[in-house]
Image: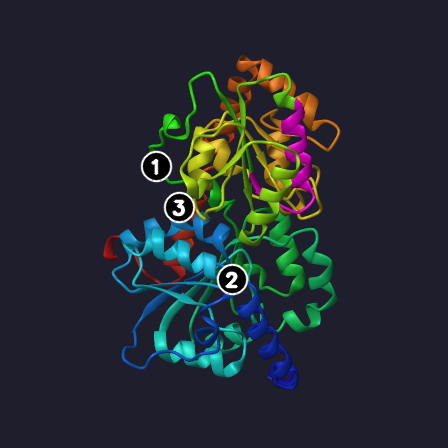
Amino acid sequence: MILIFFYNLLLMLVSPFLLLYFLIQSICINKRRGGVLRKLGFYPLNHTFENTIVIHCVSVGETLSVIPFITKISQMFDRNIILTTTTKTGWSIANERLLDKVKKVEFFPLDFPFSVLSFFRKYSPKCIVITETELWPNVIFFAKLKGIPVFVINGRISDRSFPRYKKFKWFFRNFLEHPFFMMQTDSDRKRIIEMGAIKEKVIVTGNIKYDFVDEKLEIDRKAFGLSDDDLVWIAGSTHDKEEEIIIKTYKKLAESFKNVKLIIAPRHPERFEIVENLVKNLGLKYVLRTENKSIEEVMILNTIGELKTFYSLCDIAFVGGSLVNIGGHNIIEPAIFEKPILFGPYMQNFRDISETFLKNCAAFQVDENTIFPIMYNLIENVDLRKKIGKKAKEIILSNSGSLEKTLTFILDKLNVGKKSI
């Protein structure tokens, strides 16, 4: 109680600066526009909800990865599901993809006491499900006070964040006693317990991202001017500095292989124009996805939520955030479609997954110097591409099952039997 008092006192002291920051962010950065008042707890008073299940995802990646969970739970629970997110792009994707499975898509409240309590009054959660260890003291404190169980699913503590958490474990220990944690690996389990979680409330369920929804994506290569002989290389979720490496590598490859096309998908929308200028300055012919034109050399995927679709039509996939020290992104989606995968040396956010793929020769780790020769070899060798892609899909199938473990654990703690749902 004393710690939460001082935490909120600190929030009160810095709140003018935080509110100014959020105001500037909402004005200057398009993806954060909208939802600021709702994040602060100002909701329309015309309708309230009862006994909701709140499922929180931070952004687009988490929203897309939790689709199998929401699909399953929407079939099982005869209750209102409120899906919350932090970013405007995540909110847009959730509204586009999941409105038929949830009651409402909402912005998650900022961790001010008045915001959290206003959210609880509006949506009356029966339980709160949080993806990937998104921990907010006031949310957990008031949930505990109101007897609302909190479940953290697909939890992970990255190599980068763990040292920071350890420095403040004297603080986090007081809030980690309430939630139930379903962690991806035993290493994650040990880390969250060391930070203060109760050992008996922590289990290892694996990575829920392996439990993909086996959807058939209908996409016509010919709609983009691609022939059967064209080879498509997609670079997904790219970041500053690695985009230039990718584009220069492609230009060099195109000198030897005239049939190679590049689709590059920047991670953040504010980089669309920057990447367009990079391609233009290197003298390459390009189109934007929104133009719906044929790909001559390069396409810039300047849309949100279509990356999985384009992974399905590519021949080789590079997963970004890994040539620069970001920590990498999800390599499971291209693996679902049996694609050979490349990623850089910085995969600490997906350490266990990337190590599993490398150990089983189901992916290639590259750097600025090796990406060209490895790509060259893959382009020349169709049998190698098929072999690596097949191994990648086998890993996905052999590691599935996390979704069932997660649902079983939650239902057990809520004292709800599957037959009665």
Please determine whether, in this image, residue 421 is positioned above or below residue 297. below
> Measuring 72% from the left and 62% from the top, which residue is drawn there?
164
Estimate the spatial distance between the alpha carbons at disc 3 and disc 2, rounded to whole Å.
37 Å
* 408 sits to left or right of 131: left
> Which is closer to the viewer, label 2 or label 1?
2
Quadrant of the rendered image containing residue 340:
top right
Which residue does the numbered mark 2 point to in the structure image? 30
Q: Which disc, if any, is residue 215?
A: 1
Which residue does the numbered mark 3 point to in the structure image? 404
**Quadrant occupied by the C terminus:** bottom left
**Disc on the earlier residue, 3 or 2:** 2
Residue 243 lies in the magenta-colored region:
yes
Q: Are marks 2 and 1 in contact (CB under 8 Å)?
A: no
Please tell me which residue lies in front, 66 or 304.
304
> Which is closer to the viewer, label 3 or label 2?
2
Query: In what element is the residue under mark 1?
Result: loop
> Measuring 42% from the left and 41% from the top, which residue is drawn there?
291
The residue range painted magenta reads: 236-252
Estimate the spatial distance between the alpha carbons at disc 1 and disc 3, rounded to whole Å.
18 Å
Q: Are marks 1 and 3 in contact (CB under 8 Å)?
A: no
Residue 360 lies in the magenta-colored region:
no
Please tell me which residue lies in front, 255 or 391.
255
Residue type marked 2: Asn
